[in-house]
Every structure is written in structure tokens, then in C-alpha cells.
Image (cartoon, rainbow, N blue to C red):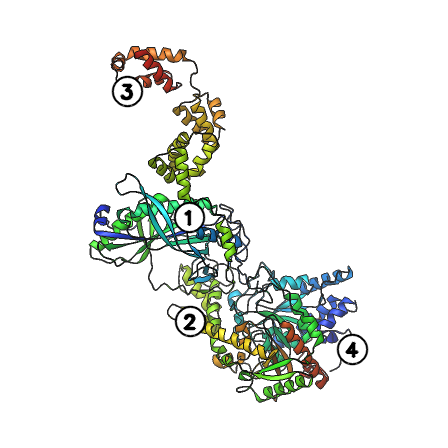
Amino acid sequence: MSVLDAVVDYDDAIARYDPVMGLEVHVELNTETKMFCGCATGFGAEPNSQVCPVCLGLPGALPVVNAAAVKSAIRIGLALNCSIAPWCRFARKNYFYPDMTKNFQTSQYDEPIAFDGYLDVEIPTANGDGTEIFRVEIERAHMEEDSGKSLHVGGSTGRIQGAEYSLVDYNRAGVPLIEIVTRPVRGAGERAPEVAKAYVAALRDLLKALGVSDVRMEQGSVRCDANVSLMPRGEDELGTRTETKNVNSLRSIERAIRYEISRHAAVLDSGAAIQQETRHWHEDTGVTTSGRPKSDADDYRYFPEPDLVPVAPSSEYVEQLRGTLPEPPDQRRKRLQKDWGYTDLEMRDVLNAGATELIEQTVADGASPAAARKWWTGEISRRANAEGRAIDDSGVTPAHIAELSGLVASGRLNDAMARQVLDGVLAGEGTPTQVADARGLALAQDDGALEAAVDKVIAANEAVAAKVREGKLNAAGALIGGVMKEMRGQADAARARELILARLT
Amino acid sequence: MSSPSSPSSPHDIVRRGAAELGAAIADGSLSSVEVTQAHLDRIAEVDDAVHAFLHVDAEGALAAARAADEARAAGESRSPLAGVPIAVKDIVATKGLPTTAGSRILQGWIPPYDATITTRLRAAGLPILGKTNMDEFAMGSSTEHSAYGPTHNPWDLDRIPGGSGGGSSAAVAAFEAPLAIGTDTGGSIRQPAAVTGTVGTKPTYGGVSRYGLIALASSLDQAGPCTRSVLDAALLHEIIGGHDEMDSTSIDAPVPGVVEAARRGDVSGLRIGVVDEISGEGFQSGVRARFEESLKLLEARGAEIVHVACPSFVKGLAAYYLILPSEASSNLAKFDAMRYGLRVGPQGVDSPSAEQVMAATRDAGFGEEVKRRIILGTYALSAGYYDAYYGQAQKVRTLIARDFAAAFEQADVLVTPTAPTTAFKLGEKLEDPMAMYLNDVATIPANLAGVPGMSIPNGLAEDGLPSGFQILAPATRDDRLYEVGAALEAALLEQWGAPILDQAPALPVREVTR
């Protein structure tokens, strides 16, 4: 990697400059077939096994619009409070790109299907003691097709420079995309990176609730391009922007924007000008590097796609689709938070972890809301993060967690044992009950052994026991630890506490 | 020019029309194999001189002919033209058969799929004789821009057969095929028909699927029949026409009754509108004279001749030469040397970039006319020029559509000479693109407005070469073309006593041993 760009401290940057963001989110729809042909869209299939003359762009092949994709686009537009165009067209965006079969992308240019909307996102208040709503305005949501995917072989970096040859998989070519573009997001100040993250998270929840996309960021089904520019505080003229391409996790969105703000500030402080360009985000090092210079001279030679007739959804159809919209995520969140009795902070953790649906299902499967939250935002979230997997792709289901928390609630397992059981479930050893049985994990069910252990530990720790007798009940924790050790973990900590206190008070 | 031997001699067979051949195959008096073989023999005899074909598929055609004969024997009647062989313009994708669009950049490309037209021809039992020559990517009015050498006009081998579908019309005129498929973006079916003395129809835009036609200008391209009679054209039109869900611009309605119209051929009470803007100045005197005579023949058969104003038509050529290159520049972008067709490495470069390979391939693979139009189109679409060029051209297109709408208030069909002149000499206009473009001045408005058009041969001009009479009808009223075309054809046949092609000189015949 080249020499890193200079950055200034983020707080310094924010003290002198107002950040302005523009967020472009590409969403792969989960339609069964592609945007313009009948090929399947399954992820991870054998390369070039889901292709036909149309999505390969063979001479003579013609596109036909997928009605299911139009339906999803309209539902997304409505959910984003957009107006739906009564009549719109596709356009050709002409440029050369090795992954693109026709050397033009069929997209929407000046006639998007949805426009002029907004999405309200919840962020913590400036002083951190609550939440507030930040409204992100949506300029447009338009339909387009995805490109294929290149694999550059033989180079050290996996990039095209230095590669011996490149392989192209066209399975993704022609998969329907919706691109959602915000108006410039201003006024977020130091919270700009947080707003961007909250926006994408809210969008992701919305898309998931609509059922229009798999919203798997790590598989690229949601990709965010983040534009950032700075204005000196007190000024009102937009600065030159950079566009950081294909940022594909919530955490990265926040980090990448934060980095760009610091980098822009350093450039501007030095008296230099920001180059309008695309930038690449590097997850490992946490920096962006310069990509292709992008100027207003980019000329895609847009013109209306003559191979397709206009898309003209009737107002009856649009209203019918409006009737299919799910409960808005913010309302739903409020309802669930109330039902579950979570604090604002707990609810925020749940949202950040993307665990709402999982918790909902786990509760439906019989777990208490508190236990469900603890498992999904704690242990499972940690493991998924460590493995770079999505929380809903971690190999454990809401039914498992409901069962596991049931074993804890009934006193058969303690938390430490439950974590071991989880290991077993993840290792494919079966259901939690099966794992607990197979591994012989169970708390001692009679008090006999436990009482003996309590007596032994009290006898060995007379000084601590004395403190408890004096009323310092917190000191009992050390004794409980001793009991657990004595029992080699096979003890119910709550029961041990009861017994210790019964002896000493 | 009567037949020298028995009724079924190969010489006799190839001079018979498609409808007649279809009937003979249906009643068993001829087999499809006989008919197909007769045409393959004719191709072998004369195509060295004519060069109508880029690729002949004797084996495939005979296999299809055998299948047609078997189907007939089994009592399956698939179409009135079942078993009648056909030639297909090389811009139509044919699975397993080379398809080059007359370009070096597609040399050797064999499509893995069939165009919808091809599928329908196969389903109807028409053996495909081979692929016909054309101007590269259908850009040209003379078939001299083919990367594989020009086609020669059967009426005079030193002359052009029209373009871009010169191969298809010449094959029909030279009796190498009773039927052919052409495509018409600005007149490429009608203008070659006019200069070869054959019939050519451009159906309503969307009336015949474009799926599998290598696109020149998507909003203008339309495939249609090339034949020697109006009825043959109608029979073929009926097979290839109709809705196709693979083409989003395809009309979702049944093909109008073109065959009945062709059989009826009646103009009594019809108002026939002469478009003066494209019938007078700049048109060869003999072409004008034949046009006037044809009007009189129609009048004598009960038509009313009226004159209609289409003031925007004169701007059609300019609008066309902005819209066509714009769409073509985008449609041809896929020819990038990466996936199929030609690939050329740049000279003296060790490890060339993708862009260098693409540039070298396009330089070697595209001809002058194609490069000229790609550059024109790229310019016309570019930011800052779009409104001045492409945008303006689209406005002219709207005006032309309005002219048509107004004219069709006053007349049931519109008529003009098809081409301003008879066939010119090979090479005569190659250095003057503008002179070449003017050949399509009368045919282009129909493509811009999407209305159907037909050219039928209406005699020989003062130079002894055929001229064409163009009929235009409102969109989706293709049946009117056949109604008027058949009436005029009948009147002319009455006058001449024999088809006009009988007056064409005999072609040099190469001795072929089979």
C-alpha cells in the first residue's frame, strides 16, 4: 500500500469543519430471477452456471423487465416515503467495465421509479442520555442491474494490476439492484459517522421487514458508497467530495467516514485542495486510498434504453402495494421495546446487533425477553463478529436459544455450562438438550454436595465469612466463587449464595 | 424464357414462387428435399458471380427438408410454406450457424442460441439454406460495406444490389432462394427490393420480434420478408410475426390478416396519398415516370389519389443520421474482444492492457463506415451535445410521427417511389457517404415513426433497371400494404404478361457436379 494520507485528530477536524455526506446504498433484491432475464439469482452457485444470452449480453439478445423487481422497487420507494413515478424509463449508462457484458449498464437516469422521500433514524442525543430522530432525506431510489464479478489471479494483492489473468463470473450479472441515494446529509456535525451508520442500519432493517432483500452486507447484497465533503464552520458552500466505494459493514461505514473527515481536514488545513475521486476502504488498516479520479468530465452518454418499453405502474397498483407494507420499523421498535421491557440502551444494543427479528422469534419460542437479549447481543454476537459472520448466519437458531435459556431457567444449567452447550450446538452436536446430555453437563440437583462444599469454603475462608457476618453481603461473592471451584463448575450459583447467606446471617 | 424441360426440372423449380412450392410440397407433387436441393444447386451455379451468401448450410437445409417431408408424410401440416427453403440475413442469430453481421469482428462466431425468427422458421418447417451478405452491421445502402466483399445485382453484375440487405434481395432475384429474411433500419429491406425487382416488407415496428437480431439501432430495426411476390411476403410475414415475450417492444396483438389481404388485392374506394416531399426532386426521371404510371393503374382499379403534406419528412434523413449512430455506438460497445469474436493484440506491446487489446481489435475488426458512425454517435450522445443533437433528432422524430398521423387522416395508405434511383455502379458512391445516405431518404420516415412499409417492383426505368413503388400504412395496419401491393402487382402483371424478373438477363452459370 502506498504512503498513508495525513490525518488530523477527529475532534480537531470537527471543531473547524462541518461534514456533509451523501450516501448511496445499493441493494440486491432477492427476486428469484434476474432484472432482465429468467436466470436464477442464487448466491454461491458454480461460476457462470446462472447465465443466458441476455445476461451474457450476446449479440442479438434483448432485455425484458422483471415485474417482481419493479414491485420490490415500488414497495421500497413507498416505505421510504417517496413519490412513485407514474411513468418512467430505463436508460443506458455507457462505459467500459470488464465485468459488464454489454459495456453499458441498464439503469435509471433522470426518471427514477421513486423520488423525494425520507427515512427517520434514531441516534443517541448529543449528551448521550437518550435518543433523538435524525431525518435523512432521500433524493431517489432507482432500478438497475448488477455487474459480474472478476477474480484476478496470480498477483499478490488480488487486484488487476500484477495479475497474470482474470476470471469473470457472470452469475451476478443482471441481478436486480435498487440504488437509494440520499440528498446531502447536513447538520449532523460530529455525529455524522454515527448518523451514516444508523441510516444504513435503519435502511437494512426496513429492507428486511419488507422482505425484498437478503440484506447480507458481508455477501455484498447491501453495499454503501459514502460521499464526504467538508465546509469550514460558518460557511455554506459545499466542499469537494470524495466517494468511498463499496463499504460493506456498519462498523466500516462509521470508520470510513470518520477517517475521510480527518483526512479531508488535514488536506484543507495544509492549504491544498481535495481531489474529486473515488476511494477504496481498507478494513484491515482502517484507511482509505485513492482510486480512480472522478470528475464532472465523466461522460456516461446516457440515453433512454430503446430495447425496453417504459414502466408505468397504475395508481391502483401502487396503492395496492402500499397496503402490503409492514409496520414501520421505528413503530415496531417502540412496540417491541415496550413489550419486552428493554431500556433505551438495551434496545439500542439490540438494533446495533441486528438482532430484533432473532429476539422476536426466540421469545416466540418460549424464552424470556431478558434471556433472549442477553444471548443474542452478548455471546452469539461476539462469536459472529470474531468469525466475520452475520449474526443470523451463526449456525444457531432462535429455537436453540429458547431451549438453552429454558435449561438455564429451570436450573439445569448455569451460564458457564450453557456457553459450553452453545459450543456443542455450534459444533453440530445437536440440540442444546442433546449436547448437555452428551457432555454430561448438569448442575447438581441435590443440596447435599453443595452444602458440604459451602461448609468447607466457609471454614477455609474465615476472614471473608466474618465480613459477611458483619453485614457486608457483597463479600459473599468470593465465597460463591470458592464453592463453584470446589464443585468444578457444576453448581447453581444462586442456590450457593442462598446457602452461604443462610449459614452466615 | 420458358422452361426447357419437364415441369419438375431444377430450372423450373427455382423459378416458382414460394406459395406455389409450398402447395406442391403439400400435395406431394414435389418433395422439400427436391426443392431444397434445386436451390442449393442454383446457389452453387450462380453465387460465385452474385455473392449473395456468406455461408451456405447444405447439410442443415437438407436435414430440415427431410424432416419437413417426413412431417408431411405423417400428416402434420405445419404451415403453407412448410418445406420451402429460405435464406436468412447474416444479422439474425442462428444456433450452430456462423453469424457475422457482415463484420470481421464476428468472423467465426457461432451463436449458441436462435433468434425468435429462426425459431419460428424452424418450427414452421422452412429449411435454412444459409446466411446472406450485408453491409457490416447493416450500415450502408449498397452491400459494399460488407467485410466479406460486395454482393452483385443480378440485373447487372457491375451494379449494387442495394443495402444493407443486398444479399437477401439478390438471392431472391437470382432464384437462389424463393424467400429471404431481411432487416430494415432505414430502408434495408425496401431499397434492395426496389433495385433488384423484388418485393420487400418492413412490418410495423414491434410486429416481428427483434430477439436475436444483432442490433444496429434498437428503436428503428425491424425484420421482414424478401420475396418475389406480395402473397409470398404475406405468407412469410404470418410465420415470423406476432408477439414475443422475449422482446419487450414486441406488439402484444395478433398479426393483422396479411394473407387474406394479399389474396384479396383490392383498392376500390381506397384513398391513396402521394407524399410529394419525397417523390419529386432528386428522383431519377424513369423512376418518377414508373411511379406516375403505377398511380394511374391504381386509379383505374378504383382508388382515389390524393396529395398529402408531410413537411417534416425532409428532416428525417438528418434526424436518422443522429439517432442511428447514437444507438449503434452503444449497441456495438459489446464488441470488445473479451468474450467472443475476433481478438487482436496490439503490435509491439508485450503484455497489453484490456483497453489496448480492445482498441487493436476494434481497429482491425470494424470497417470504415462502422467506425465513422460509432464516432458520430459517441459525439451526438456526449454531455453538452446531447440536447443539440440526439434530443433535437428525437423532436424531429415526433414531428414526423405527427405528419404521418395527419396524412393518415386523409389517406388510407401513403405512396412514394422506394428509392430515388435505380441501382448505381459498384464503387460509384463509396467515397461519398452523404450521396450514399440519400438513397434512403424515402424509406427512413417509416422507421422513425414505426409504421409499416412495402416496396414492390413497378417496372424498368429508362436505363433498363428495376424501380420500386413504396406503400406506407398506419402502424399495425400492415394488411393495407398487402391489399394495395397485391392490387398493383396484379395490374402490372396484366400489363407485362409475365413477372418483371423474367426480363432480367441470364446469369453466368458455373457447371456444378454434384
Q: Is residue B182 above or below residue A379?
A: below
The amino acid type, in three-letter code, at marker 3 is Asn
Q: Secondary structure at mark 3?
A: helix
Subunit that carries the residue with mark 2: B
Residue that mark 4 sits on: B5
Badge nearest the viewer, 4 or 1: 1
The circle on residue B383 is none
User: CA gap, disc 3 to disc 4?
Assistant: 122 Å
Q: Nearer the viewer, residue A492 or B157?
A: A492
Q: Secondary structure at mark 2?
A: helix
Sooner in the amino-acid sequence: mark 4 or mark 2: 4
User: CA gap, disc 3 to disc 2?
Assistant: 82 Å
Subunit that carries the residue with mark 3: A
The circle on residue B380 is 2
Subunit that carries the residue with mark 1: A
Badge nearest the viewer, 3 or 4: 3
Residue that mark 1 sits on: A222
User: CA gap, disc 4 to disc 1?
Assistant: 76 Å
The amino acid type, in three-letter code, at marker 2 is Ala
Q: Using the rendered image, report if marks 4 and 2 lie on a common chain.
A: yes
Q: Is residue A254 above or below residue A490?
A: below
Subunit that carries the residue with mark 4: B
Residue that mark 3 sits on: A474
Q: Label 1 crowding class (10 Å Cα cut-off): few <14, some 14-19, many 20+?
A: many
**Which residue is depicted at the point 44% across and 36% down?**
A360
Q: Quadrant of the N terminus of chain B?
A: bottom right
The answer to the question of whether label 4 and label 1 lie on touching residues, with beta carbons closer than 8 A, is no
